[in-house]
Amino acid sequence: MSARVYALANQKGGVGKTTTAINMAACVAQAGTPVLLIDLDPQANATTGLGYRPEQLNANTYDLLHGRPLDEVVLETAVPNLFLVPSHPDLAAAQVELPSGSEQGTLLRDLLVGTEERFPYVFVDCPPSLGLLTVNALAAANRLIVPVQCEYYALEGLAQLLQSVELVRTRINPRLGVTGVLLTMYDARTRLASDVASEVRSHFGPLVFDTVVPRSIRLAEAPSHGLPITSYDSSSAGADAYYRAALEVVERG
């Protein structure tokens, strides 16, 4: 049985992509299933959000893509069953350093072969772009989660992202499917958030998760403590939202 490999992608920055990657992975791990979170973003926010400083680590996703064995790069986190492949700003150079050719976009997929028994769930946090790193994530994944913030221009670029997904599915990875679109940063006090949520649902219908992640100070604070929201404040609205969203992800298969 193959692992469930989820790519979290949106070429727009600031949509809650890394927050979603960390907290969904943590929720699944806390349910008792080993989970691997791969930080494929040179900004390394998922790495720092789980309590690690990239410059103090001996290996990261840059080394992984350059042939370092996965076992030498994986770190334990403060969350039981949650493991991390950390990132580093050097990863930004990967696009020009990696060997050219058709295999350039499938390096991560090849590196994950044989890991399904150890890690039944894998979440890949993509950079906010549609470059080589995101292509590697989409080639390795069999499922896609798209976080979308409930703000103006929310739909901007989504059509391009889905076109890129279709291109990857056609040329590289026919197993890639869309698990769903997750509405994030929802502020119930504003008419705009409600309008954006309605617009996204009208465009994508059942692809949109029922759960909506609220805009939350506690969610924003958690990364500075190196913890997912479920560890930082398990009774918060943000923790409850990610518990429910993770349940939807598991149920959607």
Image: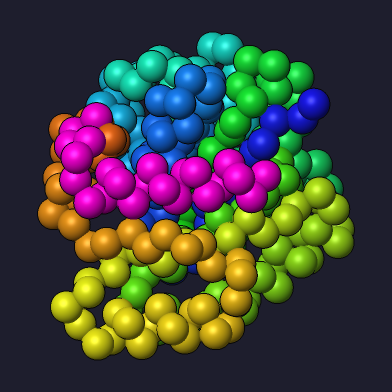
Q: What's the residue at 73%, 56% (across, down)? A: 177
> Residue 112 at x, y = what percent?
69, 27
Name the foreground residue: 126 vs 63: 126
Whether residue 80 appears in magenta in the rendering, the answer is: no
Question: Is 163 on the left-hand or right-hand side of 41?
Answer: right
Q: What's the residue at 34%, 21% (across, down)? A: 79
Q: Main secondary structure of the magenta part?
A: helix
> Residue 170 at x, y = what percent?
86, 61
Q: What's the residue at 25%, 39% (across, down)? A: 229
Name the foreground residue: 51 vs 56: 51
Name the foreground residue: 129 vs 35: 35
Question: Is 219 on the left-hand or right-hand side of 127?
Answer: left
Question: Is 177 on the left-hand or right-hand side of 186?
Answer: right
> Residue 131 at x, y = what percent?
59, 58
Q: Vertically, is 230 above or below 76?
A: below
Question: Can you tell which quarter of the image residue 113 is in?
Answer: top right
Image quarter hosting the N terminus: top right
Count of numbered circles in the view: 0
Please state the extent of the stretch shown in magenta in the rendering: 231-253
Name the foreground residue: 193 vs 87: 193
Q: What's the residue at 54%, 12% (across, down)? A: 72
Q: Is residue 41 visible?
A: no
Q: Is residue 191 visible?
A: yes
